Image: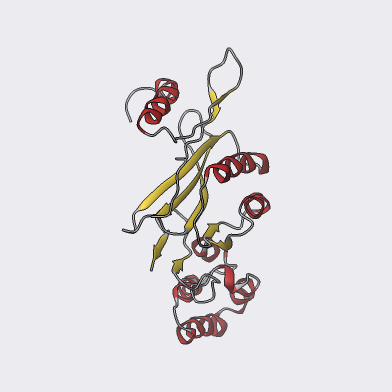
Amino acid sequence: MRGSFEHAYQLLTNYFAEVRLVDPDFVFDIQTTSSKDKRFTRCFGPPQKTYKLLRPVVMIDKTFLKGRYRGTLLTTITMDPSNHIFPLAFSIIDSETTESWTYFLEIFGANFHGYDTRFVVIYVRNPRIINVVPKVFPFAIHTFCAFHISNNIKTTLESTMIAFRMAAEALTSIDFDKHMNTIQNTDLVGLQYILGIPKETWSNLYILMSRYVVTLYCSTYHLLYEK
């Protein structure tokens, strides 16, 4: 927030070391470009602890950094019992590749003490992520972000995206069918795109984990999870 980018990045190692004094289970990994060039290329910070008090859902997403050093921020978050966002891990990488996602998720998975019950993983339909996540979490319930799907529907009608989001949140078959019929009656192209994605991967009603209600919006400000 204050000072230069150079100074802020130089403090990362000291910051993580201080955090580890408070939480000995805290895990971090910083890589540099060379022994002389101390500019880091990646850092990682998941707490190595059980998450039994958190919601059994992990959201995976990324965003692009717009500061001096650019790069991409990879994140995993969940929700606590009070429906507050709880960061699990992050990584700053030069560019989004299958290798960078593998690096991030394998370290996270190795330090992620999962739940006694099955949990849900939510992510975007990005080929790089799709190729890695099932290998790291083979026993999880894999779902796609409904918010991103709605934005990618091949349509120019805002009503189609709204109806899709309402269908994704529907808790009864009556409501689900009503919103899907709305799309069918107004936008057949958009409907075909939606039908190409299994409803078990984006619908609250048809998700395999029936004990909880999951709103499959995986952007940080769209992730909702409640009983």
Q: Residue furthest top?
A: 36
Q: Which is more toward the observer, 148 or 160?
A: 148
Choose top left, top right, bottom left or bottom right for residue 199. bottom right
According to the image, what is the colour scheme of the structure? secondary structure
Q: Position of residue 148 (x, y in %)?
A: 52, 60
Judge whether 69 appears above or below 155 on screen: above
Choose top left, top right, bottom left or bottom right for residue 80. bottom left
Q: Position of residue 219 (x, y in %)?
A: 46, 55
Q: Residue furthest front?
A: 116
What residue appears at the point 67 percent right and 44 percent down from the top-left corner?
98
Q: Which is more toward the observer, 99 or 159?
A: 99
Q: Which is more toward the observer, 164 or 157?
A: 164
Judge whether 93 appears above or below 183 on screen: above
What residue appears at the point 41 percent right and 63 percent down from the top-left corner?
225
Total number of numbered discs in the rendering = 0
Q: Which is more toward the observer, 12 or 196?
A: 12
Q: Position of residue 7 (x, y in %)?
A: 40, 20
Q: Residue furthest bottom?
A: 174
Q: Position of residue 142 (x, y in %)?
A: 59, 62
* The N terminus - image quarter: top left
What residue appears at the point 44 percent right and 78 percent down from the top-left corner?
171
Judge whether 178 appears above or below 161 on screen: below
What residue appears at the point 54 percent right and 68 percent down from the top-left corner?
202
* The C terminus - image quarter: bottom left
